[in-house]
């Protein structure tokens, strides 16, 4: 499949999957960025959102420079004016200089890549682009806890856990600082939508993650 055809397929898929949910998802990401992910992202940072999708993370995070990398052409319409959009295949050399980024963030994206080799190439690109001391933050569904429902999404190709995610990051040259096996619930794209205010409490009640969390969160540093 050509890059252009793949981009159009992504556009159709995500229009169907997230229709009617964008406002709720944006409110969720406002809380996640301000109350959790901000601890790894200084306000002076240059941040790249890998697989930015509808740009909920990068639009809401506080950073000096914001980059969003995705193939979906709809990202143009979703990105705020202070976000620089890069429409590009993540597994090929990114059009950013070596050592120019402080934080690479990715959420529910790597499992959509076509195979493990593509995941490896993507993490290597992130390592190249990061400054020494920069971090890659990886959030995604943990197949160990999601089970067969992992494959309910036709575009899930690579099964990941916090352990396998840590391994591929270490192979790329990173040092894993934290690997949380259970963090957020599985999906915000379907099913009931809990009150957004409850998320603030959930983030503070880490013991609750053991009962509800089905997504991993891994933090890795480039020395």
Image (cartoon, rainbow, N blue to C red):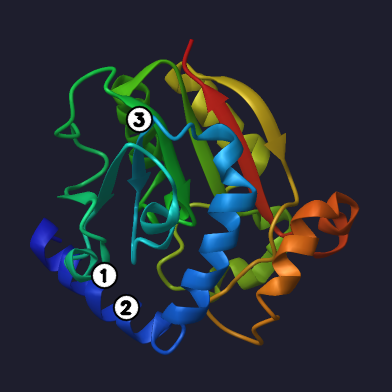
Crowd class of label 3 (few under 14; some 14 to 19; many from 20; radius 10 Å): many
Q: In x, y percent, where is residue 49? A: 36, 46
Whole-angstrom CA distance, mark 1 to mark 2, is 5 Å
> What residue is disc 2 on?
13
Q: Nearer the viewer, mark 1 or mark 3?
A: 3
Residue at (59% x, 60% y) in the render: 31
Crowd class of label 1 (few under 14; some 14 to 19; many from 20; radius 10 Å): some
Residue at (58% x, 48% y) in the render: 160
Whole-angstrom CA distance, mark 1 to mark 3, is 22 Å
Q: Which of 67 and 192 is in front in this view?
A: 67
What is the number of the mark on residue 165? Answer: none
Crowd class of label 2 (few under 14; some 14 to 19; many from 20; radius 10 Å): some
> What residue is disc 1 on?
10
Residue at (56% x, 83% y) in the render: 190
Query: Looking at the image, can residue 2 be seen?
Result: no
Label 1 element class? helix
Query: Looking at the image, can residue 146 be seen?
Result: yes
Residue at (40% x, 67% y) in the render: 155
Q: In x, y percent, where is residue 116? A: 42, 41
> What residue is disc 3 on?
126
């Amino acid at each position: 499949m050509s890059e252009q055809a793949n981009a159009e397929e992504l556009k159709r898929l995500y229009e169907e999957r997230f229709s009617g949910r964008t406002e709720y998802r944006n409110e969720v990401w406002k809380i996640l960025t301000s109350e959790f992910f901000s601890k790894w992202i200084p306000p002076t940072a240059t941040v790249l959102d890998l697989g930015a999708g509808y740009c909920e993370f990068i639009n809401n995070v506080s950073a000096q420079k914001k980059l969003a990398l995705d193939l979906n052409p709809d990202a143009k319409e979703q990105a705020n004016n202070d976000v620089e959009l890069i429409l590009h295949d993540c597994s090929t050399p990114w059009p950013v200089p070596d050592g120019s980024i402080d934080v690479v963030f990715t959420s529910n994206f790597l499992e959509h890549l076509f195979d493990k080799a593509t995941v490896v190439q993507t993490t290597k690109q992130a390592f190249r682009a990061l400054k020494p001391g920069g971090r890659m933050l990886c959030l995604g569904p943990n197949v160990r806890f999601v089970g067969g429902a992992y494959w309910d999404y036709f575009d899930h190709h690579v099964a990941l856990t916090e352990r396998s995610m840590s391994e591929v990051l270490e192979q790329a040259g990173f040092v894993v600082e934290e690997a949380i096996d259970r963090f957020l619930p599985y999906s915000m794209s379907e099913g009931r939508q809990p009150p957004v205010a409850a998320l603030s409490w959930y983030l503070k009640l880490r013991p609750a993650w053991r009962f509800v969390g089905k997504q991993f969160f891994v933090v890795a540093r480039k020395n």
